[in-house]
């Protein structure tokens, strides 16, 4: 009898743990549960402290329909243009590393307006535990509303490309879907692939995907499935693979692979220039 009680109690505790883990997520799903994965958290060492003084960028507050104002790091183009780049941060948030990368991308691309989107409403993580809570607590509806606020600011008749890393890679894809007919191209660095074919079907732009073959969390099968779904929309899916770990392109990551990151960056810049018609 005692043994039966013990196993029953253990089962209840296990179920409770799974329920609590899912209840942390506004909409339980693979990306949300990945944020709560102990191995995933352990693979992300805290970024080195870094402070960046922007050269041209500044923070803007944008109105969101039925919600609090959104934040975005905006870098204006030198001349009026219809070329736009949306930048999506990793699970750490819109920190100074991302702001520096946003300005660096503008320098590489040329005359383009850049918007680094803040999906965490001003919060920035400095530890894996903090990042896990922020990523798992991000309501997809809120994230989409923030992106829509940026698109409203951008306006109509624009060419809009997106780029993001890890969690931001997934949101880069979502941003391209939300941009609709104005979408020009999407760059995903090891972002969790969208698996809902119905959501992928409206895609209006080509996709470049960067992946590390040593990634224990984003599997080759899932990327292959995304490739098939993108091709089904009659758009190109360009896939670059490197013998590297997850988040290998992040210079604050101890597993940063400078060679692979440099090559991937060159491919991403070339892709974005082509899609945005930048010389």
Image: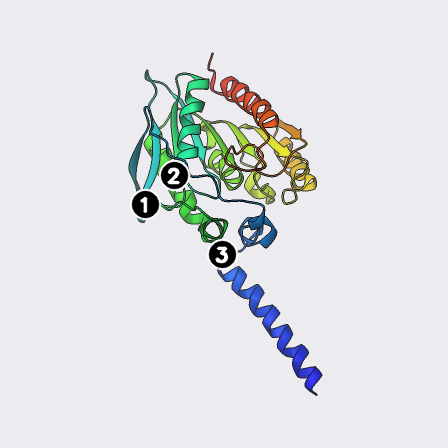
Disc 2/disc 1 C-alpha distance (Å) = 9 Å
Residue placed at 68% from the left, 36% from the top? 213
Residue located at (53% from left, 44% from top): 45
- The earlier-in-sequence mark between 2 and 1 is 1
Q: Position of residue 120 (x, y in %)?
A: 40, 46
Q: Earlier in the sequence, mark 2 or mark 3?
A: 3
Look at mark 3 in the image and give the residue it sits on: 25
Q: Which residue position is annotated with label 2? A: 148
- Residue 86: % across, % down: 43, 31
Quarter location, residue 116: top left
Q: Is residue 34 left or right of residue 222?
A: left
Q: Nearer the viewer, residue 150 or 200?
A: 150
Residue 46 numbered mark, or none: none
Of discs 1 and 3, which sits in the foreground?
3
Q: Residues within 10 Å of mark 3 (few under 14, many from 20)?
A: many
Look at the image and tell me whether residue 235 can be seen: no
Question: Is 149 on the left or on the right of 15, as rendered?
Answer: left
Along the viewing direction, whichever of 274 and 241 lies nearer the viewer: 241
Packing grade of label 1 (10 A; few <14, some 14-19, many >=20) is: few
The residue tagged with tag 3: helix, strand or loop? loop
Horizontal and vertical percent for residue 97? 43, 34
* Comparing labels 2 and 3, the label whose residue is closer to the camera: 3
Q: Are marks 2 and 1 in contact (CB under 8 Å)?
A: yes
Q: Dot 2: within a 10 Å radius of its alpha carbon, few (fewer than 14), some, or many (20 or more) residues?
A: some
Q: Position of residue 265 (x, y in %)?
A: 54, 24
The part of the image, by quadrant, that contains residue 75 is top left
Q: Kindly identify which residue carries mark 1.
A: 65
The image quarter in which residue 226 lies: top right
Return the residue found at the far bottom: 1
Which corner quadrant holds the N terminus? bottom right
Mark toward the start of the polypeptide (1 vs 3): 3
């Amino acid at each position: 009898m005692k043994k039966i009680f013990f196993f029953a109690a253990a089962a209840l505790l296990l179920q409770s743990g799974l329920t609590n883990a899912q209840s942390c997520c506004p909409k339980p799903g693979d990306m949300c549960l990945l944020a709560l994965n102990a191995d995933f958290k352990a693979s992300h060492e805290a970024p080195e402290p870094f402070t960046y003084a922007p050269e041209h960028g500044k923070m803007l507050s944008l109105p969101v329909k039925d919600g609090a104002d959104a934040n975005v790091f905006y870098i204006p183009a030198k001349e009026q243009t219809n070329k736009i780049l949306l930048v999506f941060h990793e699970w750490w948030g819109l920190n100074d590393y991302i702001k520096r990368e946003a300005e660096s991308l503008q320098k590489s691309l040329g005359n383009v307006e850049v918007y680094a989107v803040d999906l965490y409403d001003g919060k920035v993580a400095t530890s894996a535990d903090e990042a896990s809570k922020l990523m798992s607590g991000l309501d997809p509806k809120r994230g989409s509303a923030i992106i829509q606020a940026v698109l409203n600011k951008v306006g109509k008749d624009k060419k809009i490309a997106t780029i993001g890393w890890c969690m931001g890679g997934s949101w880069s894809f979502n941003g391209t879907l939300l941009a609709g007919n104005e979408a020009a191209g999407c760059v995903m660095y090891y972002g969790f692939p969208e698996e809902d074919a119905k959501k992928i079907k409206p895609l209006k732009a080509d996709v470049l995907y960067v992946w590390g073959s040593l990634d224990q969390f984003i599997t080759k099968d899932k990327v292959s499935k995304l490739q098939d779904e993108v091709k089904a929309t009659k758009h190109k899916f360009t896939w670059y693979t490197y013998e590297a770990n997850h988040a290998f392109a992040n210079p604050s990551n101890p597993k940063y692979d400078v060679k692979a990151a440099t090559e991937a960056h060159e491919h991403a810049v070339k892709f974005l220039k082509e899609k945005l018609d930048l010389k």
